[in-house]
Amino acid sequence: MVKALGRISAVVLFLCYIAATIVESNFWGNLLSPVVTLIAASSVFKNFYIKQKVKLLKTSGLLLALSIYVWAACDLLWAFFDFVLKIDPEQVELITYGYSMTNVLLVGAVFLYLCYEFRNWNGIQVLLDSIVITICVFVLIWVVFFDQSIRNIIEVQSDWSSSLSICLDVVLFILITIWYFSIRNGMIPLFLRITPGGVVLYIIADIGYYYQYFYNSYVPNSLLDASYLVAFVLMAVGGITKMERSSDNGKRVFNNVGGKGKGILLIIAPVFLILFKGIEPQYLLILISTIMFYFMISSYIQKNIYKEALLFKEKQLNGELEQRINDRTEELLQKNKELDYMLNQDLVTGLYNRRYFHSHLKEMISTLGETERIALFYIDMNKYKMIKTMYGNYIADKVLFEMSKNLRKLTHNDDHSILATYGQDIFVFAKKVAYGYQEAIEISEEIIQLCSNLYQIEELEILVTLNIGCSIFPVDAKSEEELIKHADIAMSQARMLGFNKAMAFDSDLGNVIYQKNKIEIMLKKVNFQEDFMLYYQPQVNALDKSVIGFEALIRWKTKTGKFISPNEFIPIAEETGCIVPIGDWVMLQALSQLADWNKKSTTKFKMGINVSLKQLNGKQFIHRLKDEIERLSLRPEWIDIEITETIQLEENQEIRDIFEDIRNMGVSISIDDFGTGYSSLYYLKNLPIDRIKIAKPLIDRIDKDDFDYQIVKSVITISKVKKIKVIAEGVETLEQWTCLKNLECDEIQGYFFGKPMPKNEIEDKYIGR
Ligand code: C2E
Ligand code: CA
């Protein structure tokens, strides 16, 4: 509101002044001129100085404001001399010099502004424009204004201040023309049209003044003086526009790069010349050659600017390309790192994987000092598969991860050791040692201490136990592969001793390999009738202990009278394929025995026959079974086929079909060693089976370990739903039996009720009664 009032009064004052000049009122003119000028000066000061932030422009704004202030001061002095002292102000040097000061300050203001504007413009183009404009302006001034008559007057009339003022007017005009002429590209904001417009008007008024001055025709407070004031007001309006149109305040969008620009305007000069002076060949020649020269050089400069811009753009593009290549390379390096990590790391535990362990161990061996040794620990986590079956992959993996975290402590600050995940639930740890087995056993015990704990995984508590086997390079092996193999053998031996046991490989263990070869050879020469025999182990009803049948278990007595355990030779027989004739022989023997016993006895027993998956290949097994059943007049339901899973059965359609065929005959199928191999509760849903045999390791601590108890409980519960019978193996104590009875396990097999016995013993105890 105040602002609006202020503006309105300024406009009113200005109009009053104009009116005063029209009616040629000296009094009002002298009075209003300094007032209006002061207002204009203050507005310029505020908008071009105070509100300006760029230093150079601020100084330029200050000079502009000062130039108008000086003018206002001179106007005041003028009024003072005229009214008060009654002295003709035109004769007061102070006033005339003062008015010239405005020109000086204006040149300073415009010059500083141009310095700012030209900073980022093409310098050569600016220089060329300046030269051409200066030449044209000088030629015109020379020819048009400095004709003989005016030159005489000037010579007579001119003094120091008027000469200076005129020169400065010309300079001002040239500067502004150069600026305007040089702009080839972009929009000039409104305030930059109005303010320079004001300056140009000032120049015109000033030149007009001196013209009148030289001819002694100047009348104070005439329209000429009004033009001065209009010029100042225009400068002030420019400042207001600048402030009010914020879009004009941003970054300058015009420069001197671009097409033909305003070169065509130069034509004005010769046209002007002809208009004022007619055809003056020498001056015309100067102007035309200057203009031609201008066009030639200018197009050359602009081409160069264009080329430079292209080069700059190319550089920029190259830079961007380079940046992209760098980014891409960085990305590739990162991906390589990730790949490397994936190649060398186990994803579950974050430890090194088998591949990396092998290569690292190889390197450790190759750089091993003469007196140094490497101890290798083969660490097997017990019951991993069962945990997986019970709680799923997520929990099982978490247990592995927690265990690996504890194992990491082994390698802490030790550059001479490496820890890796070797198989799903197997870790390997190799370490340079100075001594031998004693040290290795101590480390094994440390590992057991570290890892055999109750792990809290989410809301579950899972007890982890392990077995460790260790071997030492170069005592036990000559290569890294052998070293690992021997530690594995030692671990298998340790497992037989129970959970949380460690064993070092020794030459006797080495004999295992030798033994294996020996058995392989002996198996090839074995005489079935003489060397093999069957033992039978009773299977009883869990509730009343009544014998429901027997499991046929093969025994091999060598010529030397030594027994070789089926645990030892059956895997070898399976490997070599001998299992097929051996299995046939067992089946024949067991079925004949069954026929005999069931003839003699009132109880009709079942016979459990262990059948290796290798025997089930093809239809041969089924045919033979069928033939035997018919030949011996057996009832198929007396026969139970026990299968130990060594592969994931439920995914193998061929085996599922054979199972179906067997069951269609009326023969039942049991899954042996449930809970130790690949077996999962999933089996119970999908495999066509009649019974599962819970493995001895799960029964061993059923009365002591809640985890094992819970597993067996779940297995029994689920089996009941699926109408699958459950028999517990390896029951050795009353407590175990009581537990199983409470869990409603259907059947029991184990030393507690009867060890595997030869035929006579069975007959004495159970047959014919
Ligand atoms: P399996 O089928 O799991 O047989 C049970 C094994 O546990 C038998 O060992 C048996 O003597 C033993 N056992 C039974 N109750 C107890 C107990 O309460 N305590 C202890 N400590 N052990 C008990 P065996 O006879 O040495 O047989 C070992 C494995 O050899 C069998 O395990 C089976 O997988 C395989 N096998 C035995 N006979 C044959 C056969 O005729 N054909 C095939 N393919 N494999 C056979
Ligand atoms: Ca069995």
Image (spheres, rainbow, N blue to C red):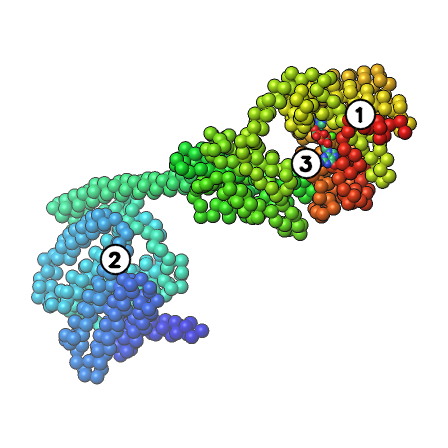
Is 547 on the left or on the right of 193, as rendered? right
* Observer able to see residue 221: no
Q: Which residue is mark 2?
A: 114
Residue shown at 65% from the left, 27% from the top:
568
Residue at coordinates 36% horizontally, 73% vertically from top-left? 10
In the picture, measured across the screen, residue 233 lies left or right of residue 581, that is: left
Vertical arrangement, residue 352 with respect to residue 202, above or below: above
Q: Residue furthest bottom?
A: 84
- Closer to the chain start, of discs 2 and 1, is 2
Q: Nearer the viewer, residue 680 or 644?
A: 644
| Residue underneath mark 3 | 676
Spatial CA distance of label 3 from label 1 is: 30 Å
Q: Which mark is residue 353?
A: none
Q: Residue at left 73%, top 25%? A: 554
* Image quadrant where one finds the C terminus: top right
Q: Nearer the viewer, mark 2 or mark 1?
A: 1
Where's residue 290, x and y in %?
17, 45
Of marks 3 and 1, the one in the foreground: 1
Amino acid type at image mark 2: Leu
Residue 264 lies, with reference to residue 163, above or below; the image says above
* Residue type at numbered disc 1: Lys
- Label 3 residue SS: loop
Q: Quadrant of residue 696?
A: top right
Numbered badge on residue 759: 1
Q: Are marks 3 and 2 in contact (CB under 8 Å)?
A: no
Looking at the rendered image, the disc whose residue lies closer to the viewer, 3 or 2, is 3
In terms of secondary structure, where does tag 2 sit? helix
Distance Cα–Cα, label 3 vs label 2: 92 Å
Of the pair 27 and 638, the residue shown nearer to us? 638
Whether tag 2 and tag 1 are in contact, CB under 8 A, the answer is: no
N-term mark: 3 or 1: 3
